[in-house]
Image (spheres, rainbow, N blue to C red):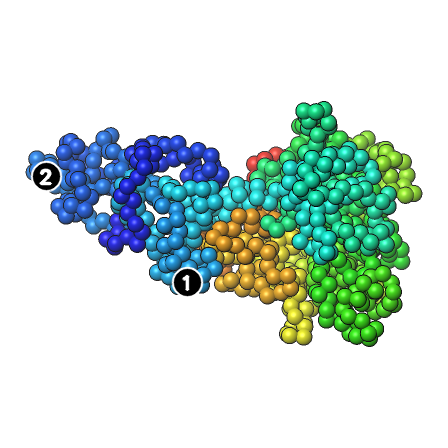
Amino acid sequence: MSSQKSSLPIHTKLNTADEDLVRKGTLNLDPYAPPEVYYGESHGPRKVGGKGRTYSAVSPPYSPSDVPRSPYDPKSYNKRWTLPSRSIPADAHDTQIEPSKSTVSAFKAPLRRTSHDAQGNTPRRYLCNVEDTLSTLLAREDTDHNIQITIEDHGPKTIQLGTAASGGYRHFDVRGTYMLSNLLQELTLAKKYGRKQIVLDESRLNENPVNRFARLIKDQFWPNLTRRIDGGNIAAVAKDPKDWTANSHPRMYIPVGAPEQFEYYTRVAKQHPELKLEVLYLNADPSNEEYVRDLNEAPGLLAVAMERIADTPDGHPDYRGLPFVVPGGRFNELYGWDSYMETLGLLVNDREDLCEAMVKHFCFCIRHYGKILNANRTYYLCRSQPPFLTDMALRVYDRIKHKPNSLQFLKDAILAAIKDYYGTWMSKPRFDPVSGLSRYVPGGLGVPPETEASHFVHVLMPYATKHGMSFDEFVKAYNYGHVYEPELDDYFLHDRAVRESGHDTSYRLEKVAAHLATIDLNSLLYKMECDIARTIRAFFGDKLQIPPEWQAPGQETFEISSTWDRRAKKRRLIMEKLMWSEEKGMYFDYNTVKKQQTGYESATTFWAMWAGVATPRQAQLMVEKALPRFEVHGGLVSGTEESRGPVGLSRPNRQWDYPFGWAPQQILAWTGFLRYGYDEEAQRLAYRWLYMCTKAFVDFNGVVVEKYDVTQQISPHKVEAEYGNQGSDFKGVATEGFGWVNASYVYGLQIVNAHMKRALGAVTTWDTFKKMTEGHGDAEHADFEAPTHVHVSPHVQETAAMRDGSALPLPHNGHGEEVGADGHEVHDQEHFHEAQCGDEFYGHEALPHSHEFEREHGPASGAAS
């Protein structure tokens, strides 16, 4: 107990309900309950458990007359007594007891000094007036006035709170940045839920930061990032902050193949004229460049998948939007590869319902718009994003395969992926027939409309001056082809390609993106080819019929696995020939115009390990040569400083370059290392990333951001690059985090072992942890089991054990002949990848292992499902 005077008012008068609350204890709730439960749903009383006996506990005779009326009675400070454990009242742990004289003569207490914070086993609970405590806390501790309490504030770092058991009379210190920032967060949430006075469990303030971070992701961040699109919220989600037009109002565009949605939204618009909702049909060819350009004069939201629910009272068919998770709190659209990364975390948290819904959304988009869109806005109709659909669908299917129609779900996803493969990635201009590789080359005319035109002032003004036009006049004239500027055409061709890649922006891609067959895209397509081959063979009798609605132009009416096996093998051989560098031990992007590797060192090289493109020997070289060039304090950096080059006022930093790190690069690299048996490297990298995220979370008021400066040890969330850093600008409490960082955190916790988690909870750097465990390898790698659903070929397992670059032995068929997954002989390394697309590597038998592992551990996953 502190002897200092409280800085908060004593709650001397309570209303009847509050008196009853304090008398009986605090809320009958889990102290770690979600805020809508803890502060919102139920405020009924609960009993406070009795205090457990301590070292100095004794059992003298007791009567109520022995209890002093005032806890500050000076007589009690020199006598150290406790009540018998069977008769301790609820507030005994906050009350000093003076024994009777007869007891003093019969018993002498052991002399032991009590610490400042001495307390019993019963968790302490505080009675807080929300407004008063919040105001006092901010006045004392928030010295930079940003409504956050961080290590950069210079307050006293302590505040006194009154205990609930004493009616707010007994006070104890809450100390340190972490506990004070947690207090700020809890008070902010309580205020949000309309609470005037709360009983707050101290365990919510001093909770292990790893546990708190993971709990917030599951209980708060995912729910707060979840959206639906239907009549119930169309006014909010259809509003577009990127609608720069003069006549801005909600618009809903419906594909011609979904007339039921057109009828539904038209009825909503008529019933709620105050929404000013405009419902329109899209053209039959929604990807036409001129049509999409014209839509920029009236941009709107694109329909996504819905589910039929009970009819309206007047008999009309009614629908509800399927849920999806957005990247950050300010978004309302379904995004492409963000959704895949979020799925990995959602599956850890047993939210396969959300994952299943997002796969269905992507199938809807491919069926009606021809591709998985960057996001479901009209100005994205020509642009896709990195394709992860097959891996995403297989993971979700593995979790829902016990449900009815789960096989139909998988079939629809594979049919959609096949259509996307042919229509998007293997068609011009994205497909380069000379190299046989694919590129990010989206369609579009003029200035990208989702970016305010002023973003390109430095690019466009010289041309406007040249043509004697104002800036706005030139933008319109250029967009509609009234002026001809081939240099600008080339500039925006590459700019759109950078955005489609998801890596906007980077000097790796700037002014050259549309010419590059990137290692990331072609690794994804290789994985897609292998996944489709595996699924057709394992689930559909090696022959999949293609219904008319899923056929791409010129496509056959059925697909067989061997066709996709051959495509995967061909792509891998091309990638090895054109993109692999034996000297550097990594893959590079290939410039299809200059017909040479770019030489830009990017962490996307590890996507080849995630997809299984690399041979075991190449994987070994990547670990030995490439990994040291990217591994820094906080995990993997996006690219090397050498490749980025110097930066300054005239050449500013790009957010996908050094020194920044992103969750997708970490996740895919971890999984790639696990796939090839490099468990130690995967754990180390995961630890580094988790430590950095945890440290920022602890020191900066629970912050979780889009990207981090992985070279910074103190404030990695402070990023100076274009677009700022989503997730850092909040008041009091971060309520959403950022989608793929949330996913990376819970996903990474499945990779590190229990010993590492304890060290992370103590916010211990990797270097310190390594020193503590040197010579104790069992401690560093205890409790780790290789994820069984990352089905690793025997070649990879044995190579991982050898690690010496020697010949790679293969399984034998009993006659001394080496065989692959399909049972055929494998005579050389080239046949390794043909074998790994077989049933042993990707086949049906691997799925039960995936399901079992994820049930027990969550997805320390991410390679072949």
Q: Nearer the viewer, residue 505 or 462?
A: 462
The residue tagged 2 is 104
Number of dots carrying numbers: 2
Label 1 vs label 2: CA separation? Answer: 51 Å
Task: Farthest residue to the right: give it.
Answer: 554
Up the image or down, 57 lies above or below 673; here it is: above
| Residue 251 horizontal side relative to residue 468, left or right | left
The image shows residue 589 at horizontal and vertical percentages of 77, 61
Q: Residue at x 70, y 44 (%)?
A: 276
Question: Which of pointers 1 and 2 lies earlier in the amino acid sequence?
Answer: 2
Q: Give the label, 1 or 2, closer to the camera.
A: 1
At label 2, the amino acid type is Val
The residue tagged 1 is 143
Residue 7 shows up from this direction = yes
Q: Secondary structure at mark 2?
A: helix
Image quarter of residue 311? top right
